[in-house]
Image (cartoon, helix red, strand yellow):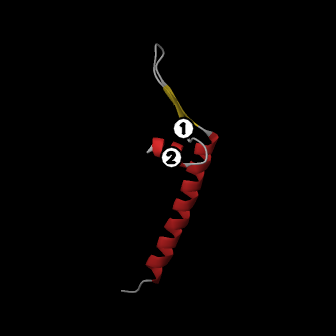
Amino acid sequence: MINHMNTNFTAPVVISKRGGKGGGNAEVTQHGINAIARFYALKQKFSAFLEDINQSIVL
């Protein structure tokens, strides 16, 4: 999934380094942090939308 995002976004979201003597690591880029923030904002708006729809449905 991360490889797909790194390839298809305008900038990488995660930069990873292969392990060696000290081990590898992965770092979320600023672009990745922005994508996470946008995801949570969208999730919040979608949750509010679903709540509104649920309240308007009369069974």
- The answer to which of marks 2 and 1 sits earlier in the sequence is 2
The residue type indicated by label 2 comes to Met
The picture quadrant where one finds residue 14 is: top right
* SS at circle 1: strand
* SS at circle 2: helix
Residue positioned 42% across, 83% down in the render = 57
The front one of 40 and 28 is 28
| Mark linked to residue 14 | 1
Which residue is the extreme one toward the bottom? 58
Q: Indicate the quadrant containing the N terminus: top left, top right, bottom left or bottom right.
A: top left
The picture quadrant where one finds residue 12 is: top right
The front one of 51 and 16 is 16
Is residue 41 positioned above or below 35 on the image? Answer: below
Circle 2 crowding by C-alpha within 10 Å: few under 14, some 14–19, many from 20: some
Q: How far across and down, in percent of the image, does residue 49 sit?
A: 51, 72
Q: How far across and down, in percent of the image, does residue 15 sit?
A: 55, 33
Query: Marks 2 and 1, how far apart in space?
Result: 9 Å
The residue type indicated by label 1 comes to Val
Which residue is the extreme one toward the top? 21
Q: How far across and down, in percent of the image, does residue 8 sit?
A: 53, 48
Residue positioned 55% across, 65% down in the render = 45
Is residue 23 positioned above or below 1 on the image? Answer: above
Identify the residue position indicated by label 2 in the image: 5
- The answer to whether marks 2 and 1 mark residues whose Cβ atoms lie closer than 8 Å is yes
Is residue 27 positioned above or below 3 on the image? Answer: above
Q: Indicate the quadrant containing the C terminus: top left, top right, bottom left or bottom right.
A: bottom left
Which residue is the extreme one toward the front? 7
Query: How many callouts does the rendering have?
Result: 2
Is residue 21 positioned above or below 48 on the image? Answer: above
Q: Nearer the viewer, mark 2 or mark 1?
A: 2
